[in-house]
Amino acid sequence: MRKNAGWLATLTAALAVAAGLAAAPAAAAPDMSLKDTMKKMQAQVLNGDAKPLVGMFDATKVKGKPEFANWNAMSDKGKAAAAKGDLDGAKATCKECHDAYRSDYKTKYGSRAP
């Protein structure tokens, strides 16, 4: 009988922890949306079609942070290139942004960026 009580206590504790984790606010979950958008952009570049990148540049624009002064301008530049069907121009804009901000963004915000 004593064995069953120990098992029941362990199960109860595990359920309590699980319930606590389930009740945690959604904001605690990492925001992977920028990373997901970048993956979609890469796949589209590999497909060789710039047009679908237009909306994706909009999605990256809203993830910019005030300390990255040219982020919005770069997003607009990439969007304009994509709208014209200029895949090389869109890719160059991606590289420009990555060269300027990727390391600092990942260091400061990582996957938890709001």
Image: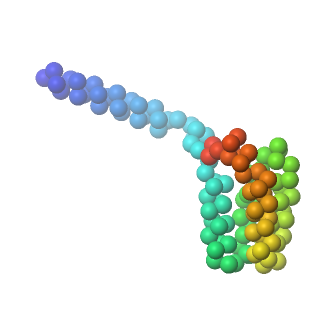
Horizontally, residue 4 falls left or right of residue 52, namely: left
Q: Is residue 59 above or below residue 88?
A: above
Quarter where residue 43 is shown: bottom right
| Residue 14 image point, x, y percent | 35, 32
Q: Quadrant of the N terminus?
A: top left
Quarter where residue 91 is shown: bottom right
Tell me which residue sits at (77%, 74%) in the image. Answer: 88
| Residue 24 image point, x, y percent | 52, 35
Horizontally, residue 16 falls left or right of residue 100, namely: left
Tell me which residue sits at (79%, 77%) in the image. Answer: 86
Q: Is residue 20 above or below residue 33?
A: above
Q: Is residue 85 above or below residue 113?
A: below
Q: Can the viewer see residue 70? A: yes
Tell me which residue sits at (59%, 44%) in the image. Answer: 30
| Residue 76 image point, x, y percent | 84, 63
Using the image as rendered, state which of residue 39 and residue 33 is in the foreground.
39
Q: Quadrant of the C terminus?
A: top right
